[in-house]
Amino acid sequence: MNVRYLGHCSFLIVSTKGTNIVTDPYGIHIPYKFPNISADVVVISHEHQDHNAAWRVNGEPFVVKRTSDFQVEFEVPVKRTKEKIVFTGIPTYHDGTSGRRRGPNTTWVWHMEGVRYVFLGDVGHVLNDKQIAAIGGDADVLFLPIGGLTTVGSTEASLIINQLSPKIVLPMHFKTPQIELLNLADEPLEVFLNKMANVEYTYTMSIDIDLARLPFKTKIMVLNYE
């Protein structure tokens, strides 16, 4: 499988059979270059315009988003590749005040080829026991916001790593020159990385994921977004 970083909280995950999943495509006000891509599934964590621009993804994808206050599950059959993927949506919040400031958020969990993917979206708090139990075990690949201000910052992000014991952490939603005036994050990537051990700069936009080759110790993998 391959995971490619598209910037902000958006990733393209491609199975070995060719199923394409895109997470949280951002609107045109985010000044990253969103690629001209197609997908079978688009995963949306919450309804803010820097996360819900499914219209930017070609191919009439199935859009997975939570439509209730409770945990949800979607079984998505991909006819093109004959794969079936189950997405579990776990209610979380966009802030540390039970959503009173920024509303709800959904943490999405799915398995592909034996690998457990956990996409936290714009989570704004450390997870509670119920949420950890709903995730259902250690994360293999954790998509983790780290930039603070509107999500968890580096300190809370490190606590979430301790809670979920991921094999691979892919940082997202951090302050960059492109978005520093948009009030979306106030901590750059380096603030988080300075608190972490076992950091790998990939110097590329994508990495290959293989169940048999997952690291034994949590590894922070930094992907370029363009």
Image: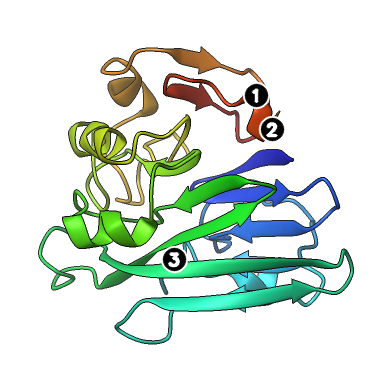
Which residue carries the number 1 mark?
A: 213
| Image quarter hosting the N terminus | top right
Q: CA distance from mark 2 to mark 1?
A: 5 Å
For mark 2, give the secondary structure: loop
Quarter residue 189 falls in: top left
Number of marks in the image?
Answer: 3
Which residue carries the number 3 mark?
A: 45
For mark 1, give the secondary structure: helix
Q: CA distance from mark 1 to mark 3?
A: 28 Å
Does the residue at mark 2 contact the one at mark 1 (Cβ under 8 Å)?
A: yes
Q: CA distance from mark 3 to mark 2?
A: 25 Å
Q: Measuring from the top left, give residue 57's x and y in whole percent.
A: 72, 66
For label 2, the crowd category at 10 Å Cα-Cα, with few meaning under 14, some 14 to 19 and many 20 or more, is some
**Three-letter code for the amino acid on which mark 3 is drawn:** Ser
Say left or right for 151 vs 39: left
Q: Measuring from the top left, give residue 215's x and y in whole percent.
A: 53, 21
Is label 1 or label 3 in front? 1
